[in-house]
Image (cartoon, rainbow, N blue to C red):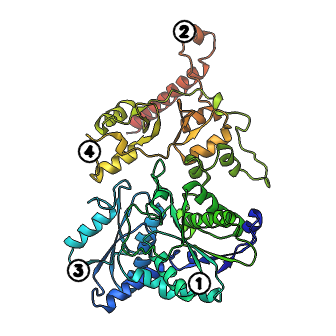
Amino acid sequence: MIRINNITKAEGIECELLVKAEFLNPGGSVKDRIGRRMLLDAERLGTIKPGDILIEPTSGNTGVGLSMAAAARGYKMIITMPEKMSQEKQDALKGLGATVIRTPTAYAFDHAKSHIGIAIELTKTLKNAYCLDQYKNTGNPMAHYEETGMEIWEQCEGKIDYVFIGAGTGGTLTGISRKLKELDPNIKIIAVDPVGSILAEPESLNGPPPEGGQQVEGIGYDFLPRVLDRTLTDFWVKGADKESYLMARRLMREEGLMCGGSSGTAMYAAIDYIKANKIGKGKRVVVLLPDNIRNYMTKHLNDDWMYERNYISEAECSAGARSDLIPNTDWGQDLTVGSLDLPDAVFLQDTTSIGDALKAFYASGFAQYPVREASGKITGVLTKTETMKQLVKKRVTEADPVSSLVQRELRHVSKTVTLDELGRILARNRFALVEKTKFVTTSDLLKKVSPPPKAAAPCDSKASSEGGCCKVQQLAAAAVLGMGLSAAATFLFMKSKN
């Protein structure tokens, strides 16, 4: 349990604000608890034995917790996980020996090819394969009823007024709320649900997902997991992606807590609720921070990632790359993108078939195309790399529209961006779209940094006789002739010796 000091001061909060630091668990999240608990419960019941295959659909953290336990206890592990989850999670899982299957994020939970659908199918077809299924496994809430909830009570010595808990599968919320309400019915349980999820009550709180889908990982669902018990929750708060990530960054910068995005969601909701309800001195608020930054090094920790999703401004992104402590000596500070001679961007329509897009790639030599709808709205970028990957995986066919492959990580820049900043941007992105009309690549910037030499004019007889621009060519020709005569003389000498 850690006391928040700097953020409370900055926000004018007078109540005591504590965090339950679940991000410090061995695998980096609160889900370590249920991974261990579900496996040991299944062993005790005789359902599984070492050498069996365990399969789990997950947003990543439960997969890590289970994979750690599986590695220690001698099980094989298969993890099914939506593509929106970070690459860091996949790498950690593979490092633990798990086989990882990524599924399209857009598929609903009951789609046959969703991460849940794939897990169900593999459990049926593989021999000695078992799905412990965190969404309905009683070990999920029981781990938090017997452990996490009791720890919060003991660490606070029974003095608790409010507890804020993010809702995912619902196991954490269910287990902690049951334990704490048993010990003190006056404790208020506030559940936190991201925008786009349907877990909150009343149902009127639940609106459509944000454009591009929910970004915060590990909380929120499009269905009600069986282990979720909402009857002991006193109030629900919705949390948006932008505010979640900004708060997660503040927890790092101002409190030194290396937290993930869902921790930001919970903390933002707590601060907003505290202010709205004027919770003041003498009250104690506990916020559960569920996971750490390890899984998100390339996400909200990165200024470019934040800017690309409109969570911070272009100016904030540029400022983040500089320091007030050391001078900037980079080239291009006095030049802007507007000084470059750039080609117009060539767009593909989102209805273009993948087959036609491939023809465009082959004919133009381009490695990427921006994509837009008929209305003119730019939806993202189609790259050769993503097209190749999805065709190899047989997830798409050439008849499918390019909208099924569009990546939203299209970097936008304005003409006022300085060229030193553009250099930093292009070190991360191979290209960028300038004010929605032109494309800029590393080649365009290199030509400005170090212009290519102009082609030499061809020699003519007059220039040669006057010893003009072709003197270098004449000297080179004389050198070649000299080497030829030398080689011929050497050959004749050797022949005479024989």
Answer yes or no: is residue 31 visible: no
Rate crowding at label 4 as few (under 14), some (14 to 19) or many (20 or more) other CA atoms within 10 Å. some
State whether residue 58 is above or below residue 68.
above
Rate crowding at label 1 as few (under 14), some (14 to 19) or many (20 or more) other CA atoms within 10 Å. many
Q: Contact, CB < 8 Å: mark 3 with mark 4?
A: no
Label 3 sits on a secondary structure element that is: loop
Residue 366 position, x and y percent, is: 42, 35
Q: Quadrant of residue 331?
A: top right
State whether residue 273 is above or below residue 334.
below
Q: Residue at x 55, y 25 (%)?
A: 476
- Among numbered discs 3 and 4, the one appearing first in the sequence: 3
Q: Which residue is mark 2?
A: 461
Q: Which residue is mark 3?
A: 128
Q: Nearer the viewer, mark 4 or mark 2?
A: 4
C-alpha separation, residue under disc 4 versus residue under disc 1? 52 Å
> Viewer-proximal residue, 453 or 224?
224
- Say which amino acid is labelled 1: Ile
Q: Quadrant of residue 46?
A: bottom left
Q: Which residue is mark 4?
A: 397
State whether residue 356 is above or below residue 226.
above
